Image (cartoon, coloured by chain):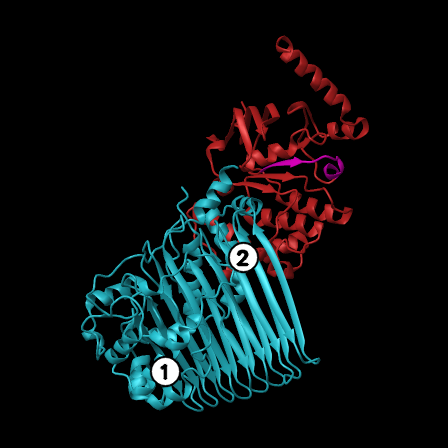
């Protein structure tokens, strides 16, 4: 092994840059999970009776379930009684009315993260609903959106101000019985984002949420619900980071999207949770259920994700193509480095006639990283004329990482057309040397090769996000070569 | 008195996987000259090309290489490239998803930055590269295809020469650029190379066959055997090798080496 492979190692062993901890007083419930804890959470949030009922039903169901182990990820057992299920920055129980009320320390944290929370975001056209641990601390642009009839607020506010909408749609895509982690989330979720776009309204700006896990030993269980009513359009951005810690933290979120007739939802994620250190110590366990429902005809839901963080990623953003002619898309870049593990992919469930889905998955493994694509394409008997195209590409850096592809295809209608393509390639020292011999540094060469590999997915991201995603990949891969 | 050589190789010993390949190679190349390095398979021709470009795995155990008066071996591969050394690969590497034009632009701008010049924007760059394309008789669509991916053998080699034309190196090393080319492609490549000959630029052509030298007339021809230059001459030497083969040169080189190493055996 010569100099080149050492360089390659350095390139892919970049330290986590968002690993700072903000010392804030936190208002937390005691460790562990019981009906009392759930009642306490619900009471703290002053929730209506239907919410508490729903949580308790979920909790009782959860007690009958066991943790799933079918994914190609490995972790020590999680002690669910050793987690703090609710933590809010103290004094923020009611939620601040404006930025001026927000703890300056908190604002500095966001600044370090580069969340545009101030005036400049007006220029950027981003409305941010920032979730800090469990309570939404600042929601911007609400007034401007309200004038269009758009509701964009924290989940807690939605429960308070729009209980009818919440009651109608909550759990209608991901029921509280869905899976171990989603059921846990249903019982204990503390906050999240809520968005409703009324009929015929095209949301004039990208809506954005920045999630961040701050307090120690806090599981983050947020819940996002987005409804695009008939003919509505919304593009939603989600970004995530978490501070550096030795313990593993659990993140079990649920995202539900509902697109009604002719509506379109574009959901983009850049996930940069703390991945653990070079030895695989610490890092976020990210067990997330994301699902969209193209509930009525001619609707469209597209997921775009760039996953560079977390010790473990377990995530399958899916689309139920219920309405005729509805369209589902999944575009994904997943990077695993050091000892990170990702088991990610999608499910496209074709129920309506002439429904179409596209899956484009790009997995990058480096170090000892393990990357699995797991995808289900299901065409029901009712889905005449359904079409799917799937492409899964894997890129390997070095020779200690792994890539797996698990495509599941179930077709019950003979008129369906399903295509699957897969490839695996490796960044070789010959490619690096080739670029270097053209004057390009090894570091830039790796970025160049990786961004070439991810190009088709980045194209799907909104402009500012694409730039961020590209930077993030660069950061995750760059190193300190002399 | 002659000016200082652009490239000066003294007593160069190189091992690959602990196996000695080059054993005391001496070579001097001056600006404006074209040198052909010939020799049988396994004589160390490609090793010489790679060691000059800085490829890892080629370990210099003795000797020195000076380029423009500097210690070349102390420089990283990308620094050598930015200082004007260009290697045209025998087997150009594929980079999926990266457009050819993107690599070219990144490379040229890396060199311009190094020289303290402003980077070219997309418009100026495209104008420059289109001019070079005409020179290489290459189709513009090649710019937008992924680097070398799905290129025919001839396209790959032409692409190397296109890169050379865009980067305008001081010292170009062409490693078996003629191998695998049909006669038309060979002419195109040779035209590109000839168009780039100039007083400020030196070239080293590494080749097994004399065929390329029908189209590019070298100033000097060297025969590598047993890891060193066994024989040097003018352009006529290439023709003699074509007639007589390499065996006689090799035999002589072996004789010399045995003589030199005599007492130790």
Q: Position of residue A347 (x, y in %)?
A: 55, 73
The structure residue drawn at horizontal position 63% and vertical position 53%, both measured from the top left corner, is B148
Please rate how many residues cluster around mark 2, counting C-alpha atoms within 10 Å: few if below 14, some from 14 to 19, many from 20: some
Distance (Cα) linking label 2 and label 1: 55 Å
Which one is in front, B159 or B147?
B147
The structure residue drawn at horizontal position 59% and vertical position 87%, both measured from the top left corner, is A324
Label pair 2/1, CB-CB below 8 angstroms: no
**Residue that mark 2 sits on:** B102
Q: In the displayed structure, does residue A18 sit left or right of residue B150?
A: left
Among the 4 quarters of the image, the one containing residue A142: bottom left
Residue stretch rendered in magenta on the structure: B202-214
Which one is in front, A386 or B62?
A386
Among the 4 quarters of the image, the one containing residue A248: bottom left
Instruction: Give the red chain's letter.
Output: B
Q: Chain of mark 1?
A: A
- Asked which secondary structure carries label 1, the reply is helix
Frontmost of labels 2 and 1 is 1
Same subunit, labels 2 and 1: the answer reads: no
The structure residue drawn at horizontal position 65% and vertical position 83%, both measured from the top left corner, is A381
Question: In the picture shown, does residue A202 fall above or below A432?
Answer: below
Q: Position of residue A21 (x, y in %)?
A: 26, 59
Q: In the displayed structure, does residue A434 sit left or right of residue B185?
A: left
Q: Position of residue A97 (x, y in %)?
A: 21, 80
Instruction: Give the cyan chain's letter.
Output: A
**Residue that mark 1 sits on:** A54
């Amino acid at each position: 092994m010569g100099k080149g492979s050492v360089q390659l190692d350095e390139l892919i062993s970049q330290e986590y840059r968002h690993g700072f901890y903000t010392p804030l007083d936190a208002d937390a419930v005691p460790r562990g999970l019981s009906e009392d804890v759930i009642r306490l959470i619900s009471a703290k949030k002053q929730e209506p009776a239907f919410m508490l009922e729903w949580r308790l039903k979920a909790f009782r169901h959860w007690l009958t379930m066991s943790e799933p182990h079918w994914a190609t990820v490995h972790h020590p057992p999680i002690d669910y009684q050793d987690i703090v299920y609710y933590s809010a920055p103290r004094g923020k129980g009611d939620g601040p009315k404006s930025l001026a009320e927000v703890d300056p320390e908190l604002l500095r944290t966001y600044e370090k993260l580069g969340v545009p929370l101030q005036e400049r975001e007006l220029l950027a056209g981003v409305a941010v609903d920032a979730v800090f641990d469990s309570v939404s601390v600042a929601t911007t642009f609400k007034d401007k959106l309200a004038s269009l009839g758009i509701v964009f607020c924290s989940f807690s506010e939605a429960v308070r101000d729009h209980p009818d909408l919440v009651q109608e749609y909550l759990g209608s895509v991901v029921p509280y019985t869905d899976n171990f982690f989603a059921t846990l989330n249903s019982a204990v979720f503390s906050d999240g984002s809520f968005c409703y776009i009324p009929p015929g309204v095209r949301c004039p700006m990208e809506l954005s949420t920045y999630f961040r896990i701050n307090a120690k030993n806090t599981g983050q269980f947020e819940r996002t619900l987005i409804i695009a009513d008939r003919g509505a359009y919304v593009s939603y951005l989600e970004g995530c980071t978490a501070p550096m810690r030795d313990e593993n933290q659990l993140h079990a979120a649920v995202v539900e999207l509902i697109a009604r007739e002719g509506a379109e939802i574009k959901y983009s994620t850049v996930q940069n949770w703390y991945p653990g250190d070079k030895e695989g110590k610490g890092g976020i366990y990210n067990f997330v259920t994301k699902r969209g429902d193209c509930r009525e005809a001619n609707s469209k839901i597209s997921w775009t994700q760039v996953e560079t963080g977390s010790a473990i990623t377990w995530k399958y953003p899916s689309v139920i193509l219920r309405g005729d002619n509805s369209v589902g898309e999944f575009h994904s870049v997943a990077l695993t480095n050091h000892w990170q593990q990702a088991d990610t992919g999608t499910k496209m469930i074709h129920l309506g006639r002439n429904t179409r889905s596209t899956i484009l998955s790009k997995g990058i493994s480096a170090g000892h990283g393990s990357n699995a694509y797991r995808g289900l394409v299901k065409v029901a008997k009712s889905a005449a004329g359904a079409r799917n195209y799937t492409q899964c590409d894997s890129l390997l850096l070095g020779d200690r990482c792994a890539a797996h592809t698990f495509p599941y295809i179930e077709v019950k209608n003979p008129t369906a057309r399903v295509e699957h393509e897969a490839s695996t390639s490796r960044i070789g020292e010959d490619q690096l040397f080739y670029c270097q011999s053209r004057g390009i540094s090894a570091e830039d060469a790796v970025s160049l090769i990786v961004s070439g590999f991810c190009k088709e997915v980045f194209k799907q991201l909104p402009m500012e996000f694409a730039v961020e995603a590209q930077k993030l990949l660069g950061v995750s891969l760059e190193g300190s070569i002399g | 008195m002659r000016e200082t050589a652009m490239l000066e190789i003294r007593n160069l010993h190189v091992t690959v996987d602990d196996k000695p390949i080059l054993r005391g190679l001496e070579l001097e190349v001056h600006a404006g000259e074209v040198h052909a390095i010939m020799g049988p398979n396994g004589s160390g021709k490609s090793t010489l090309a790679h060691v000059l470009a800085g490829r890892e795995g080629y370990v210099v155990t003795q000797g020195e290489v000076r380029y423009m008066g500097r210690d070349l071996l102390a420089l990283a591969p990308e620094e050598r490239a930015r200082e004007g050394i260009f290697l045209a690969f025998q087997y150009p590497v594929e980079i999926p998803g990266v457009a050819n034009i993107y690599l070219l632009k990144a490379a040229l701008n890396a060199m311009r930055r190094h020289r303290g010049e402003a980077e070219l924007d997309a418009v100026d760059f495209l104008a420059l590269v289109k001019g070079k394309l005409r020179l290489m008789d290459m189709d513009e669509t090649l710019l937008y295809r992924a680097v070398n991916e799905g290129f025919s053998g001839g396209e790959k080699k032409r692409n190397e020469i296109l890169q050379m034309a865009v980067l305008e190196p001081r010292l170009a090393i062409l490693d078996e650029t003629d191998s695998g080319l049909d006669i038309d492609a060979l002419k195109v490549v040779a035209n590109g190379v000839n168009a780039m000959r100039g007083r400020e630029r030196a070239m080293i052509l590494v080749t097994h066959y004399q065929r390329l030298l029908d189209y590019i007339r070298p100033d000097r021809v060297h025969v590598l055997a047993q890891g060193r230059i066994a024989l040097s001459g003018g352009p006529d030497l290439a023709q003699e090798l074509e007639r007589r083969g390499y065996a006689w040169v090799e035999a002589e080189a072996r004789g010399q080496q045995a003589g030199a190493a005599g007492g130790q055996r």
